[in-house]
Image (cartoon, rainbow, N blue to C red):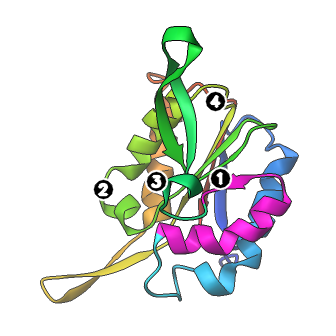
Amino acid sequence: MTEPTSYPEWFYYPSRTRPPDWVHELLEVVAAARPLIDSATVDGLTSDKVLAHLRPRLLELGYEVEGGKHRAEKIRRPVLFGDQGRERVAYEVDAVHDELGILVEVEAGRGARGNAVYRDLVRSSLIVNQRFLVLGVMRSYRHQSSGRPIIVSSYRDSKDQLDALYASGRLRLPFEGVLLFGY
């Protein structure tokens, strides 16, 4: 008999480390939004829509969360500084908790078929003062190819990528921990 899957699916890296308390608080936010963001049952999800549903409760927990596509609603974090200590290179992120050093990136369909997880790992690794990375991906991504329905297990594919990265030891991420969750 198989055990029912809890929602959201999640894994914390490195697996030799107990997840910090904030992990469970963040996952409660995701679980509360399940009727609106469960990729197994809700069609037409985008990363912006998912983030918008998570935003109110993340704000309550002290996160700064992207509010839209206008420049003033974006969140930028520095990568490099230049003359007179001015920010020279910065990246936009979905959400951040500066006090705890948590950076959050949420991906949708592109995360399943593109290399968004790899891109997020590299770019977020360069951002100053981030101790933890949170990656949210769809549990399943449904699309059409040549008129046939295709289902991609985004969470499992992303977990395989992170498992390989941590198991190989060849590439070390600069984070104390990485939380992967599948919504």
Where residue 160 sits: x, y (%)? 46, 50
Would you name the residue on which mark 3 appears? 158
Residue name at image x 44 percent, y 64 percent: 154
Provide the major secondary structure of the magenta segment: helix
Sequence-first disc among 1 and 3: 1
Q: CA distance from mark 4 to mark 2?
A: 23 Å
Q: Amino acid at mark 2?
A: Gly
Q: CA distance from mark 4 to mark 1?
A: 15 Å
Disc 4 target residue: 175
**Of helix, strand and loop, which one carries label 2?**
loop
Left or right of residue 100, residue 171 in this image:
left
Observer-nearest residue: 7 or 110? 110
Query: The disc labelled 4 sits on which kind of residue?
Result: Phe
Q: Amino acid at mark 3?
A: Ser
Give the mark nearest the N terminus, 4 or 1: 1
Please tell me which of labels 1 and 2 falls first in the chain.
1
Pair 1/2: label in front: 2
10 Å neighbourhood of mark 2: few (<14), some, or many (≥20)?
few
Magenta residues span 47-66
Residue at the image position 47 percent from the left and 60 percent from the top: 107
Q: Nearer the viewer, mark 4 or mark 1?
A: 4
Residue assigned mark 1: 11
In space, the residues marked 1 and 2 are separated at their CA atoms by 21 Å
For the N terminus, the quadrant is: bottom right
**Disc 4 + disc 3, Cβ < 8 Å:** no
* Among the two numbered marks 4 and 3 on one chain, the one whose residue lies closer to the N terminus: 3
Which residue is labeled 2 in the image? 114
Return the disc, 4 or 2, that comes first in the chain's sequence. 2
